[in-house]
Amino acid sequence: MSRINLTMLSDDNVMKDYRKLYNSDIAESLVEDSSMRFDSVEDASMFFARELDYIKSKSYDVLYPEFNALRLFAASSEVGAGAETITWYSYDKTGMAKIIGNYATDLPRVDVKGTPSTSHIKSLGDSYGYSVQEMRASRMAGKSLDVRKGRAARYAIDYLANKLAWAGDEKAKLMGVLSPWNDVPLFTLSLNAAGTSTKFVDKEPWEVLRDINAMVEFTAYLTKSVERPDMLALPTDAYLYLANTPMLLNPSSGAVCTILKWILDNSPRLKGIVEVPELNANSEITPYPGQGVAFMYKKDEDKFTIETPLPFYQHPIQPTGLEFVIPCESRNAGAVIYYPLSMLIAVGV
């Protein structure tokens, strides 16, 4: 290997790809092609190892704004990638004090009771690859290998992880924030004045305000004001209705503002209202098809987290015949919900 200074291969993944290529027949066959202009197998292996390193970096850094779960919710990767489950305990105080005499011996006993809960962890995976002919073409054209394959692999895993965070997968025992079996309270929206619809877009501004206030009050009632969610996620049509519909503030002066601005300026609890396409009635992600969903929550890792023990990872290349394949993997536990009553779901918004 005199032609290659191996000290240049400081990155472990690049070194792994280099060795895989060097030990395969792919680099050797490319060197034998006079049009490729490689001096040796080492040169060819080094060139494509660096190409793959570039592709992996590019695909890993790509962000897709339509995936909102990790943007909106607290995320965690503290659990090891080798774990199969996540177990946590919910503790509750038991017992009560009482008035006692000076020489009392029957002091009431208090204690702490812990109840375990478990979430499962599953692997997500896909792969992409390049044929020998694609390598020839990229080298002859003086261009890099197409990074779009790596991006497509990252996109597919991110899409599934985002879907699991929202809707979960009952068969795989993964929970999402909207999963019907997750014990998050369901709020029943009121009908509009005509008695025909629960959708915000079919209501007057005061009816929308009544619904949102009732959602806040519902959580306060259930938890005796212990839980105070401060974010409201809405489908696109409901959000745009709030953002664009004016409401009259003062009949004498004619002062107006949008419903959205009035809520954010005056609500004692809500700090933000966001648009989330995953909650749309036509979304492929929501477990309530055909109905827009509102989700009220608090972005707090003590309330719930999106658990990803292993973020998107690309393994070293696997030479197979006249191509090489890059396996991609992630480990995901969906949403781990510690306090279901800190959240609220309203269907049909």
Image: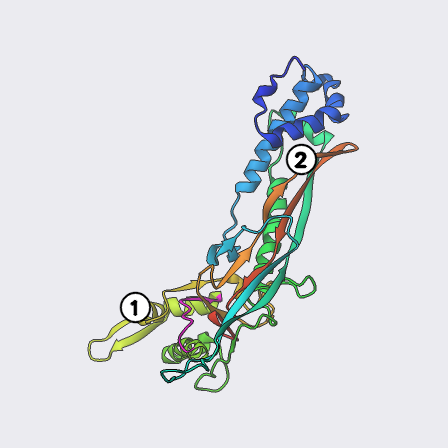
Which image quadrant is residue 104 in? bottom left
**Label 2 Cα neighbours within 10 Å, binned few <14 / some 14-19 / many ≥20:** many
Q: Nearer the viewer, mark 2 or mark 1?
A: 2
Which image quadrant is residue 180 in? bottom right
Identify the magenta region. Answer: 224-235
Q: Mark 2 vs mark 1: which is more N-terminal?
A: 1
Type of amino acid under label 1: Asp
Reply yes or no: does residue 225 show up in magenta: yes
Query: Is 97 on the left or on the right of 123, as rendered?
Result: left
Secondary structure found at label 1? helix
**Image quadrant where one finds the N terminus:** top right
Secondary structure found at label 2? loop
Residue extending farthest to the right is 321
Q: Nearer the viewer, residue 76 or 139?
A: 76
Q: Where is residue 21 shown, x and y percent of the image?
A: 71, 27
Find disc 2 in the rendering and name its residue.
316
Find disc 1 in the rendering and name its residue.
265
How many marks the image carries: the answer is: 2
Residue at screen point 60% across, 66% down: 117
Q: Where is residue 37 shown, x and y percent of the image?
A: 67, 17
Q: Is residue 136 visible?
A: no
Residue at screen point 67% across, 51% down: 123
Q: Where is residue 33 shown, x and y percent of the image?
A: 74, 19
Main secondary structure of the magenta stretch: loop
